[in-house]
Image (tube, rainbow, N blue to C red):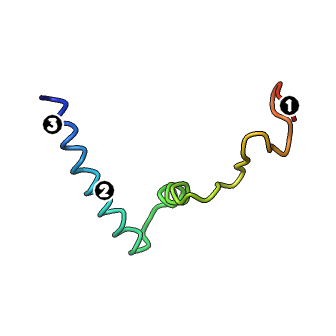
Amino acid sequence: MGAAVVLERDWFDLGNVTAVSVEMIKADVLSDGMRRLERAASGEPLPGYHPRGESPVPLWGGPA
């Protein structure tokens, strides 16, 4: 029973966090850290991201 209560509380917390986040985005008051998270969640490749096997430099002990 305890786990069900925790899950239920987290479910409602998710809605609150989402609502507050949307309001902060609309008001343009996100901190730098929150902007980085927003960019990371956008689905766009992050700076410095290279798909597996396409690194511009050789990695430790692996193929170039």
Q: Which numbered disc, 3 or 1, marks the residue closer to the eye?
A: 1
Q: Nearer the viewer, residue 11 or 33?
A: 11
Is residue 61 shown left or right of residue 2?
Answer: right
Provide the residue designation for mark 2. 17
Badge 3, how many Cα within 10 Å: few under 14, some, many 20+?
Answer: few
Secondary structure of the residue carrying numbered label 3: helix
> Which one is nearer the viewer's eye here, 46 or 28?
46
Residue at label 1? Answer: 63
Q: CA distance from mark 2 to mark 3?
A: 18 Å
Task: Judge whether 43 appears above or below 4 on screen.
Answer: below
Mark 3 to mark 1: distance in Å?
50 Å
Residue 59 drawn at (x, y percent): 81, 33
> How far separated are the C-alphas under marks 1 and 2?
43 Å
Which residue lies under the disc numbered 3? 5
Which residue type carries mark 2? Val
Residue sticking out furthest to the left: 1
